[in-house]
Amino acid sequence: MPSPARCSSFVAFALVLAAAGDVAAQSPTAKPPAAPAPAEESEPAPEPPPPPAGTAASTVKTTGTVGAQAPASNGAANIDDTKFATSVTSEPMDATEAEISAGGLFTSGNARSAALTGGGRFRIRRKIHEFQAQLVGNYAQASIRQMDGSRDGQLTAGNVQGRVRYDVYFHPRVTFFTMLTARFDPFLGLNMRMRVDPGFAFYIVNQPKHRLWAEIGYDFLYDQRRVRRGADNTQCPAGTSLVLDVPNTTSAMPTCAARPSVATHSGRVFLGYSNLLSEYVTFTTGIEYIQAFAPFRSNPVETDGGKARSKSWVNWDIALTTALGKRFAFATSFTLRYDNAPLPGIKKLDTITSFSLVFKFI
């Protein structure tokens, strides 16, 4: 039988082994280093959360030079990066418009007359470039009773005017333009009056329903007069020898000039205003002032009254247009043209009042 001392030593050794096993079980076992994971492609940054419903950014997609804007009158709200935008709600930059207008007046019986007016307009804009073309004509004739009871037709109005214009919108509120205007008007003794007008336009108020702008620039005028070849000039004032072909003039009181053509250099200012009064009614007006500086005064022998006058012109247009549907509109317009130094026998002031039906192609 083993001795008690040996049994005690055995028990103590067993307890030491058991404690060492407990410590080994609680200690973490070292693991071999793991192989490096393959590099993953970087993912794009997450988009910011959408703004709350009902805000401008949640209903309008915007790009370009300004932030979100309320939709324009025609529903378009996107602005291309290459276009300029004002700080207010603006119209779409790209636009194409084409329309024609016509009106008339006819009387019979004791008074017999006929008057016609018509015109057309075209406008196209692409980004910062805009082109416009316009043509307007007026014609009127009356039947005059003669002393023997017969009637003779007499021309009472007849003129044609055309205009083309090109604009570059290099700033939200400033444009550079070049405009060419040609006018045929025998009652002014003119085969052609041509004006070339480069300048700058400044948009003081530029909203879809409300616009106010001013223009300033240079004006070159060239008049080609209607000379009646072979006409008797014995009744012409001293210094003039050319008889002009003006309707309803007689050889006893001719309209005369010293030169068949004349050129004038001037300065030009213009102020325009447009207002969409309602969904169907539009009001527009514009006034133009042109002051000559070379020559500053007219030729005395070519001026009514025989006195030199400063050469200046005032043109004023006002119109009220009422939409009758998607394509048709009714327009009422008034035009005033004032010439401070007309030829002898020609009045300073001309006015035209017209009523027209407008048809819009585009």
Image: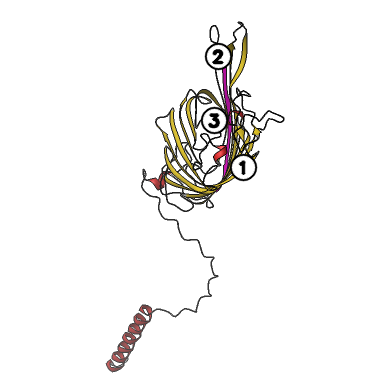
Q: Which residue is mark 2?
A: 106
Q: Which of pointers 3 and 1 lies earlier in the amino acid sequence?
A: 1
Q: Please, what is the three-letter code of the amino acid marked with disc 3?
A: Ile
Q: Which of pointers 1 and 2 lies earlier in the amino acid sequence?
A: 2
Disc 2 element:
strand
Circle 1/circle 2 CB separation < 8 Å: no
Q: Please, what is the three-letter code of the amino acid marked with disc 2?
A: Phe
Q: Is residue 274 above or below residue 331?
A: below
Instruction: Say which of marks 2 and 3 sits in front.
Output: 3
Residue 287 seen in render = yes
Circle 2/circle 3 CB separation < 8 Å: no
* Residue 268 x, y percent position in the rendering: 50, 45
Q: Which residue is mark 1?
A: 262
* Residue 86 x, y percent position in the rendering: 44, 49
Q: Which of pointers 2 and 3 lies earlier in the amino acid sequence?
A: 2
Q: Is residue 300 magenta?
A: no
Q: Which segment is the magenta one? A: 108-128
Q: Please, what is the three-letter code of the amino acid marked with disc 1?
A: Val
Quadrant of the image occupied by residue 250: top right
Instruction: State the separation of the CA atoms marked 2 and 3.
Output: 27 Å
Q: Is residue 329 above or below residue 261?
A: above
Total residue callouts: 3
Q: Nearer the viewer, residue 132 or 289?
A: 289
